[in-house]
Amino acid sequence: MRLSLIAPLLCALAVPAMAFDQGREVPGGDAVLAPRERVAVENRILAERFETLLPRLMAETRIDLWLVLSREYAEDPVYFTLVPQPSHAARRTTLLAFHRKADGSVDRLVVNRYPLGEPYTSVWSGGDLDAQWKALGKLIADRDPQRIGINTSRQWPVADGLSHALHQRLVEVLPEGYASRLVSAEDLVVRWIETRSATEKAVYPQVVALARGVISEAFSTRVITPGVTTTDDVAWYIRQRFESLGLPAWFQPDVNFQRQGQACERDSDFCGAEGVILPGDVLHTDVGFCYLKLCTDTQEMGYVPRLGEDDVPAGLKAALATGNRWQDLLTSQFRTGRTGSEVLAATRTASEKAGIVSRTYTHPLGFFGHSVGPTIGMWDDQSGRTDGGQWPLHPDTAYAIEGNAKAQVPEWGGQWVQIKLEQSALFDGRRVQYLAGRQTRWHVVR
């Protein structure tokens, strides 16, 4: 990797990091780039991905020419991961072509009324739609690729972005006999979406730390007044806090509580309720936002002390430790080449052997919150037969280590409590590392 490409980018990100106070993350200054400043960073990351990842991934998936064809406001899901910023749409019709040459390098070409500029080379610009499509046909004839990848897929929605109408137009302008060269580019799309570059791996910890810091704020007396504040109040605080930093939430935050005397069964799918937060409540939140095109998905637990309590009850501390033990059992099963279903099966076996009541529903992270790659269980399906379960693990891929473990709490008369955890992590091909640590101690609202 060229140092000249990476060094300016890391310098641009040399902003105050999160400060750590006894295991709880708190904001340590304004660590978020302004929207204008993000453009250069995102474009350098894109250039790096084109230089270091795309040639290798096209060779791995045996695609000679990859076509990503989009119309304005009907963009292919992968489109915005491929174009420089600022960009709001595939203006009119934008035809992207990536040609893998004999020397292994990849030409990045655009056939578009409005040229994209670097890192693309424009091979046609103008206003006539028919001429635009004919120019694409000529490009294909001139390059003479044997395997032309198009974004069609029965399994992966993200890899199924080629519309029926654009497919028809493509077939119309292909040279004679070339239609048989069209192949699904789904493997290439998944590998492109799931693989993280060197700089993305360097940046991702700070992105995740921002999420954990906002949760720490939310689960404190800065936000919660027991007996007054509702779970919905906290959820909206989290969303508005992200928005104040210019960080779009990719789903509405969820906040709920478990309470002594409110049943949580051993085999319940979900334990939790919404409403006014009271002393003695166990809190849970699920939040996610995207920054520098990288998405987070985080779940953590909090406790609201009762009058006279100086600490979290020992039974709840033990329950969180059980959740951490489940995480360890799961991440120890990650092996390059193992499928998601194989990791799930091994985790279930290890959890049962350890006497842990758990469910595993871990998914890839990256350009999308629920991204593509190995599916390691679903909250409502632990069979391993779900879509994505047969996709193998690859190095340099990120995951939301998500699931729950249940434990009985003596202080609550043996009532079950569900510990719902989700932390962002990177698999480097050998081990799983949490991008910004993980919760091992309760957030305490005080």
Image (cartoon, rainbow, N blue to C red):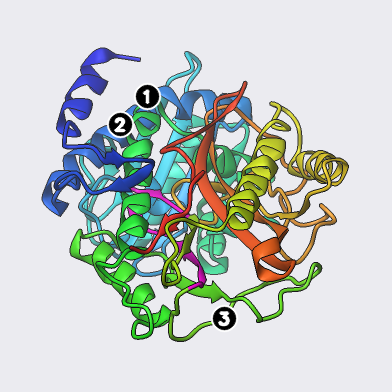
Vertical arrangement, residue 360 with respect to residue 266, above or below? above
Quickly name the residue at label 1: 51
State how far apart marks 3 and 2 are (Cα). 46 Å
Q: Is residue 233 magenta?
A: no
- Give whichever of discs 3 and 2 has the lower sequence position: 2
Image quadrant assignment for residue 421? bottom right
Vertical arrangement, residue 281 with respect to residue 331, above or below? below
| Mark whose residue sits in front, 3 or 1 | 3
Number of labels in the image equals: 3
SS of the residue under disc 1: helix
| Mark whose residue sits in front, 3 or 2 | 3
Q: Is residue 113 left or right of residue 152?
A: left
| Residue in the picture at 37% in, 38% down | 204
The amino acid sitting under disc 2 is Ala
Residue toward you, 17 or 373: 17
What is the number of the mark on residue 47? Answer: 2
The amino acid sitting under disc 1 is Glu
SS of the residue under disc 3: loop
| Residue in the picture at 23% in, 37% down | 17
Which region of the structure is painted magenta?
A: 280-297
The amino acid sitting under disc 3 is Ala
Image x and y of residue 189, in percent: 55, 44
| Residue in the picture at 32% in, 51% down | 213
Q: Is residue 171 visible?
A: no
Image x and y of residue 206, in percent: 31, 39
Quickly name the residue at label 3: 273
Image quadrant assignment for residue 431? top right
Labels 2 & 1 near each other (Cβ < 8 A): yes
